Image (spheres, rainbow, N blue to C red):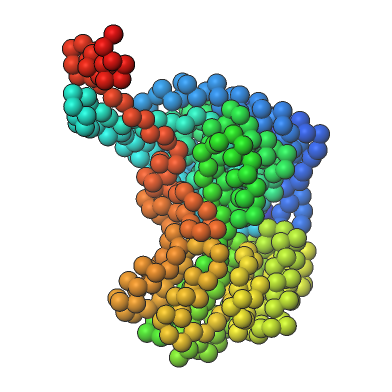
Amino acid sequence: MDNPGTATPETFPAQERLADGAQYIAGRFAKGTSGRTHAVVDPATGADVYTYELAGTEDVDRAVAAARDAFPGWAATTPGDRSDALHRFAAVLADRAEEFARAESLQCGKPLKLTREFDVPGTIDNTAFFAGAARHLQGQAAAEYSGDHTSYIRREPIGVVGSIAPWNYPLQMAAWKILPAIAAGNTIVLKPAELTPLTSLLFAEAATLAGIPDGVINIVTGTGKEAGEHLVGHPDVAMTSFTGSTGVGKRVAEVATATVKRLHLELGGKAPFVVFDDADLEAAVHGAVAGALINTGQDCTAATRAYVQRPLYEAFVAGTAALMETVRLGDPFAPGTDLGPLISHAQRDRVAGFVERARGYARVVTGGEAPGGELKSGAYYRPTLVADAPQDSEIVQSEIFGPVLVVLPFDSDDEGIRLANDTPYGLAASAWTGGVYRANRATREIKAGCVWVNDHIPIISEMPHGGYKASGFGKDMSAYSFEEYTQVKHVMFDNTAVARKDWHRTIFGDR
């Protein structure tokens, strides 16, 4: 069902504040200096929302310099002071929640009900979590491991962090990059995707309003080739954190290696959705549709490969297709809309290409087309179910990043788990079963950073997010992310009254 809606997006309320430009450096908006402009486009209508000057290398240099200058003062603050600042930050975000929700919907095409109920509340919760966690970042006391010496461990901030965030969850990805970094005492320069900079800029502005010092959080909005590579390779950047495709992640790692930076990569995914024959079929069908279509399928953890044990296979295919056909595409600001457009027409065409090529070797059960009528001008694509594709086919092995679910049958439990692991990726997965043994086996043997049981997609601030294999390494969210943004120092004291000459004699002899 399509839902063109009657609501029209309000004028972007922060547009006047962003008139000074789409860079945020040392607590102020500024224009880019690359000499080129870029337009943020509403993917639901194709209309330009905001045009800005892209950042060049000079802007990156200014942002890094601001972060470098702010680092000593921010690193010297107590965990309690950083915690208080983050609590104020969460309060500012809560006060501006509707503005963030509308901006995110406008630049991404997400249904407003999704940004109001998921993206923005999740970001506020994440900020509140790190406000508390900042006070628990501590070293470890130790005893006399070496005779009369006492050792202990210090956890220290790394320095200036250079981060690059993707376009699919611009607000949440900005939060995932910024919050653990600054809670640990680092300063940061974030480059959001040039398609979706609005909420990252507003996030940095909110931090300033909360009293976080100028230069602690800086935003540069430019292309990956120019601004991104310069940020990653910058000699004053001590760590790089990147979320995006595996292909681009390899290039980021190559550039970062030249200056021996700390590296955190959260890359692509091709999440398996394994349904055993003792699963609740209705629950699995609903879970598959929700898990596959979240954010129009533009989610690294989205369910993309459903493996269904043969006794349930045909019923699962029929039930999933029927439920997909009830999903309402439409205006993201209309209350009845379930699914918005893809991020761009180029992304829609890429998704459509995967499905069209699959028609030669698989069965397109439902979807497989862009809607017409009042949705024709947007980057919409109907929810699509593809069945019976070979395991080694492109549509099974490659990340599509769209509202497409592929379903394949399996016979034995061994086969189901083997197929689930049979891609280069390992970010997320789910297992659907009524048996404790099967659940335990699946969670143990499926190689992914997160394995849900009888659910797919929920995340919480207290638990880590990150992948195995070609999905990268390192963790976002949770206390584990502090390990990404801190370095460990061993401190050792000689407890004797005077320096021990015996040690020197051991090395140098009697002198």
Rendered location of residue 479, percent (x, y):
37, 45
Query: In the shown orientation, is residue 142 left or right of residue 319?
Result: left
402 over 15 or under it: above or below = below
Q: Nearer the viewer, residue 296 or 473?
A: 473
Query: In the shown orientation, is residue 461 left or right of residue 322?
Result: left
Check the image and name the residue furthest to the front: 510
Look at 35% across and 39% down and name the residue there.
Answer: 132
Rendered location of residue 368, percent (x, y):
69, 77
- Residue 11 appears anywhere in the view: no
Look at 28% across and 8% down and name the residue there.
Answer: 511
Q: Nearer the viewer, residue 387 or 323?
A: 387
Rendered location of residue 151, percent (x, y):
26, 28
Look at 62% across and 65% down and name the residue there.
Answer: 399
Rendered location of residue 86, percent (x, y):
42, 35
Query: In the shown orientation, is residue 203 left or right of residue 231?
Result: left
The total of numbered circles placed on residues is 0
96 over 425 or under it: above or below = above
Check the image and name the residue furthest to the top: 511
Q: Quadrant of the N terminus?
A: bottom right
Check the image and name the residue furthest to the right: 35
Q: Nearer the viewer, residue 1 or 253?
A: 253
Query: In the shown orientation, is residue 470 left or right of residue 128?
Result: right
Look at 38% across and 38% down and name the residue there.
Answer: 131
- Residue 365 appears anywhere in the view: yes
